[in-house]
Amino acid sequence: MKRVYVNEQWCLACHLCEYYCAFANQDETDMSTALKGVPIRPNIRVEQLGDVCFAVNCRHCDEPLCVKGCLTGALSVRDGVISIDRDKCVGCCTCVVSCPYGAVTPTEDGVVQKCELCVNTRDGEPLCVKGCPNAAIVWESVVR
Amino acid sequence: MPINYIYPDYEIERDYDKCINCRVCERQCANEAHAYNERRGKMLADSSKCVNCHRCVSLCPTRALKIVRTAHTFRENANWNGQLINEIYKQCDSGGVLLSSMGNPREYPIYFDRLLLNASQVTNPSIDPLREPMETRVSLGAKPDRIERGADGRMVNNLPPRLNLSMPAMFSAMSFGSISYNAHESLARAATELGIYYNTGEGGLHEDFYRYGPNTIVQVASGRFGVHGEYLNAGAAVEIKMGQGAKPGIGGHLPGKKIVGEVSRTRMIPVGSDAISPAPHHDIYSIEDLRQLVFSLKEATAYTKPVIVKIAAVHNVAAIASGIARSGADIIAIDGYRGGTGAAPTRIRDNVGIPIELALAAVDTRLRDERIRDRVSLVAGGSIRSSADLVKAVALGADACYIGTAAVLALGCHLCRSCQEGKCNWGIATQVPELVKRLNPNVGYRRLVNLMNAWNHEIKEIMGGMGINSIESLRGNRLMLRGVGLNEKELSILGVKHAGE
């Protein structure tokens, strides 16, 4: 299945993916209106130390620890995408601490958030990939 | 700074209603023109640092930025314009020669824009290139002037080595050093996929790119940087660079700060040393000397590769080309005064050389008159801006064209003409690792391939309209051209009739 992969060689640490992600997860269709003056909570984050930088989001692991650890069944694997059922999440944050990539984050609403590969957004495909200026983030199927 | 004489030519305009403070402009500007002001909670810009390269504009996710020409002006004067006044101020500060990049930007006539192409009507049918075969392949090199037969009466193949192109275009010489590793990789991969050639320029060939050798032209210039036996034999042809359209009569100077690790290794000079190419080749002071170098290079490559001699279009270009054709060279490349550069003295770039259209027509005419046109192929460069320019160049007598500026535009260049600063925000004319990284060759090569494929479609379309199904039948076919608004002298040099004639 297609997943978001990040090629560290081409990441420029421009952080645009974070803003496109934050925009993708809003109903508002104008980016300025959606993001102006509000702190963003993206599901993809650029990690940087010295010259090394890359974007990190949910790896949609084959054996996801977050799903295993979820007390309520809010997290599940649907067609290879680890999805979240907001009605079921009780905000216990077991997934947050069990994810080795730090890809699940708590929110002020009491439920966690994570990358769902934009399957439920209006674009239907990851906006971080579309918005990456250097093709450092790609959406591909890699045969293992 | 007590007195600042220079007001920036361009100003950064930000629509604060759209700006979301994502700071991508700040992160992506190598000139540090943008900065986030914590106290005011907004992005601010210093236009004096802006080179108008559009990196920030192109990456701004909300289109909040634009660069506008400043309304600030000197008291108007038709003779002393603002640019001249500013240049005086700059030289008063620096005491140095003014440097510029890319081609001559001044308002000299552009003859391509005064030439119109023909099309078929009624008496000769036009051709639909989508339905009928249309040939844009060309073969460059000397043509034998007689058929030779062996003792058995069979024809002997006496065809000298040639370059075979899928379309009449090649990427111009741009050295590794003046442009980045990723830019070179993009050009090499695109040339390979397209079945054309790119040119190493005078910077040697990086060892990673030897595998693109069959689509590489290796250059030998006055500094001889990176030249060795393996290098000469790595390419499909060897080019002797005698001159460059942007700076005829001038050598090259790649500043020491660009001679970093791989560039230093490839050029075979120490890290940090300036790479200075002399103005002349110190072993060439005549056509006879040139002939010696041509044959030295042929000898070094066992007569398996054509030799190109590249010259700048200057006043006496036709006579010079005639000499080169007799020197044993297989291909003559002529570079017009609009041709690009990574750095040239401004006064040279803006005032030396002649238009490629006139030079090309003059050379083609001269070689035909002297019955030596078939001894060489002609390649024209120096601002072929579109497929239409290319078709017109072929009709004026070119076998193929060198594409330089258009190729770097494909890689993201915005013609800000600041290459000499070494801080190219698009990762092209720089050796700074975090800037070089901005040009992903996977993207760059694809854009080059797209551009050339688009041009090839357009060339076929234009040829079809003229009722010509092979680019070879268009070469030097000046009846397919008509001039508009040109005087008798210009028309006679171009060998073209006026529209309506």
Image (cartoon, coloured by chain):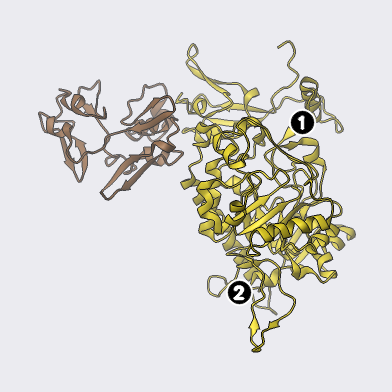
**Dot 2: chain letter:** B
Q: Is residue B319 left or right of residue B380?
A: right
Is B147 drawn above or below residue B460 in the view shown? below
Q: Out of B374 and B288, give the one closest to the viewer.
A: B288
Q: Is residue B485 visible?
A: no
Location of residue B305 by image quarter = bottom right
Q: Earlier in the sequence, mark 2 or mark 1?
A: 1
Dot 1: within a 10 Å radius of its alpha carbon, few (fewer than 14), some, or many (20 or more) residues?
A: some
Q: Please determine if labels 2 and 1 lie on a single subunit.
A: yes
Q: Which mark is residue B413?
A: none
Task: Specify the amino acid type for callout 2.
Answer: Ile
Residue B380 % position (x, y): 72, 57
Q: Residue furthest right?
A: B489
Q: Is residue B101 left or right of residue B279?
A: left
> Chain A hue?
brown
**Dot 1: chain letter:** B
Question: Going 52% across and 36% down the picture, which residue do you hit?
Answer: B436
Chain letter for the yellow colouring in the rendering: B
Q: Which mark is residue B127?
A: 2
Task: Specify the amino acid type for callout 1.
Answer: Leu
Q: Out of B459 and A62, give the one closest to the viewer.
A: A62
Q: Is residue A27 left or right of residue B313?
A: left
The residue at which mark 1 appears reads as: B98
Q: Out of B451 and B162, give the one closest to the viewer.
A: B162
Name the secondary structure under disc 2: loop
